Image: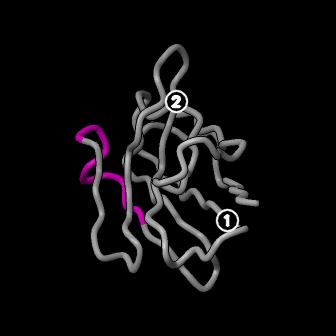
């Protein structure tokens, strides 16, 4: 079955950087588009970045464009989210997801941006 395991979250100061990883299993990773989502306390879950199969295209939400970079390593079945110049508004639990499979989520990884 499809499994997604996110890691790399933590506590970081404003202006700092983190790189999140999501290891996928249970499907042929290279053939699927992947996305990173986040859910802040009291807010809806939102997509922040996506990457097509073969890394042919990437998209970003307005709130992270220019600060976050999504990438993938198909031979490791892993998608990454490099986050730079972090702000307090980036505090959330971050999840990855196969974009066509809307009901399967990992456990998420918590990012807290604070002094």
Q: Residues within 10 Å of mark 2 (few under 14, many from 20)?
A: some
Judged left or right of residue 14, residue 79 is right
Residue 33, horizontal then vertical, whole percent = 43, 64
Q: Nearest the camera: 35 or 92? A: 35
Q: How is the image coloured?
A: one colour
Q: Quadrant of the N terminus?
A: bottom right
Report the span colored magenta: 62-70
For the point 48% across and 69% down, the residue is 32
Q: Examine the residues drawn in magenta and state their main secondary structure.
A: loop
Q: Nearest the camera: 11 or 40? A: 40
Q: Is residue 69 magenta?
A: yes
1 and 2 marks in contact (CB < 8 Å): no
Secondary element at tag 2: strand
Judged left or right of residue 72, residue 112 is right
For the point 40% across and 35% down, the residue is 87
Residue indicated by mark 1: 23
In whole angstroms, how far apart are the C-alphas of marks 1 and 2?
19 Å
- Please say if 75 is above or below 81: below
Residue 2, horizontal then vertical, whole percent = 70, 59
Residue indicated by mark 2: 39
User: Furthest-right residue in view?
Assistant: 1
């Amino acid at each position: 079955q499809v499994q997604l395991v996110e890691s790399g979250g933590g506590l970081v100061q404003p202006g700092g950087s983190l790189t999140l990883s999501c290891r996928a299993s249970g499907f042929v990773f290279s053939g699927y588009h992947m996305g990173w989502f986040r859910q802040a306390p009291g807010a809806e879950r939102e997509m922040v970045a996506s990457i097509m199969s073969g890394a042919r295209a990437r998209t970003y939400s307005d709130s992270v464009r220019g600060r976050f970079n999504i990438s993938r390593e198909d031979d490791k079945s892993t998608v990454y989210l490099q986050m730079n110049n972090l702000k307090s508004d980036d505090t959330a639990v971050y999840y990855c997801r196969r974009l066509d499979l809307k009901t399967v989520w990992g456990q998420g990884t918590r990012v807290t941006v604070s002094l």
